Image: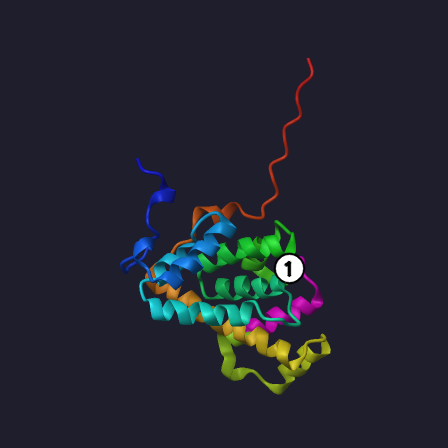
């Protein structure tokens, strides 16, 4: 039986061969592969439409890599919580792995995905995630009072934009993953976990 890692990612649409992709997309994927050691399935699946691939990852970088009052770990926390709310297996698992690494907390992603209100986070982060869930589920109901509550926790208006933009972008990502039937790579499940402790040797 062939190795699962050698199989193309699952999708309801044709998944292109890497060698046949435009040079800029191959370069982008090669950079990710060099850093992570594997090709995340989202890159292979979305490469089905190169122009949309470019637009998707340009906006991804704009909201996830920019200088911000939110840490990169906090942005990943938003992704995990709102992706769980949207029922997106791919983003919960993939970004849960990144959140564990960014926050150096092997338990955090599972806590966030199940019930962020009981997770090992600060009150400021709890307020951030409360707002993200509101944007995710009922954006039309956001009020000035919601903004004021975030300001009381030290968030600037630019930070509030970042919370909303990350939430909105990954709502798009969640839906892309859903209708394509995208699944997370096996490698994500182990990333950022505590290494197994060696068993003590018995002395006889």
Residue 143 position, x and y percent, is 59, 85
Query: Between 37 and 129, which is closer to the camera in this rendering?
Result: 37
Which residue is situated farthest in the top direction here? 204
Position in image of residue 120 (x %, y %): 67, 57
Name the outermost residue toward the left: 14
Above or below for 136 versus 119: below
Write the residue at 43% across / 67% down: 173
136 or 55: which is nearer to us?
55
What's the magenta region? 119-133
Say left or right for 185 vs 122: left
Q: Residue at x 60, y 36 (%)?
A: 196
What residue sits right under mark 1 in the picture?
118
Residue 13 lies left or right of residue 172; in this view the side is: left
Q: Quadrant of the C terminus?
A: top right
The crowding category of the residue bearing disc 1, from other C-alpha atoms within 10 Å (few below 14, some 14 to 19, many at least 20), is few
Q: Is label 1 in a helix, a strand or a loop?
A: helix
Residue 160: x and y, percent? Answer: 61, 78
Q: Is residue 8 magenta?
A: no
Q: Residue at x 53, y 64 (%)?
A: 79
Task: Please name the residue shown 50% across and 83% down the image.
Answer: 140
Q: Position of residue 72 (x, y in %)?
A: 61, 63
Quadrant occupied by the N terminus? top left
Nearest to the observer: residue 100 or residue 24: 24
Is 127 one of the magenta-colored residues?
yes
Q: Image check: 183 left or right of 196?
A: left
């Amino acid at each position: 039986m062939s190795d699962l890692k050698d199989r193309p990612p699952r999708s309801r649409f044709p998944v292109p061969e890497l060698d046949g992709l435009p040079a800029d997309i191959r370069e982008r994927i090669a950079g990710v592969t060099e850093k992570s050691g594997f090709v995340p399935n989202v890159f292979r699946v979305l490469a089905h439409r190169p122009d949309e691939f470019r637009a998707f990852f340009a906006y991804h970088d704009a909201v996830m890599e920019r200088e911000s009052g939110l840490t990169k770990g906090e942005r990943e926390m938003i992704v995990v919580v709102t992706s769980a709310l949207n029922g997106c297996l791919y983003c919960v698992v993939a970004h849960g792995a990144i959140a564990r690494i960014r926050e150096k907390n092997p338990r955090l992603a599972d806590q966030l995905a199940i019930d962020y209100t009981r997770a090992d986070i600060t009150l400021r982060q709890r307020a951030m995630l409360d707002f993200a869930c509101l944007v995710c589920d009922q954006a039309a109901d956001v009020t000035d009072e919601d903004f004021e509550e975030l300001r009381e926790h030290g968030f600037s208006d630019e930070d509030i934009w970042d919370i909303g933009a990350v939430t909105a972008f990954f709502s798009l990502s969640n839906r892309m993953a859903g209708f394509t039937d995208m699944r997370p790579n096996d490698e994500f499940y182990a990333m950022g976990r505590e290494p197994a402790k060696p068993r003590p040797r018995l002395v006889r």
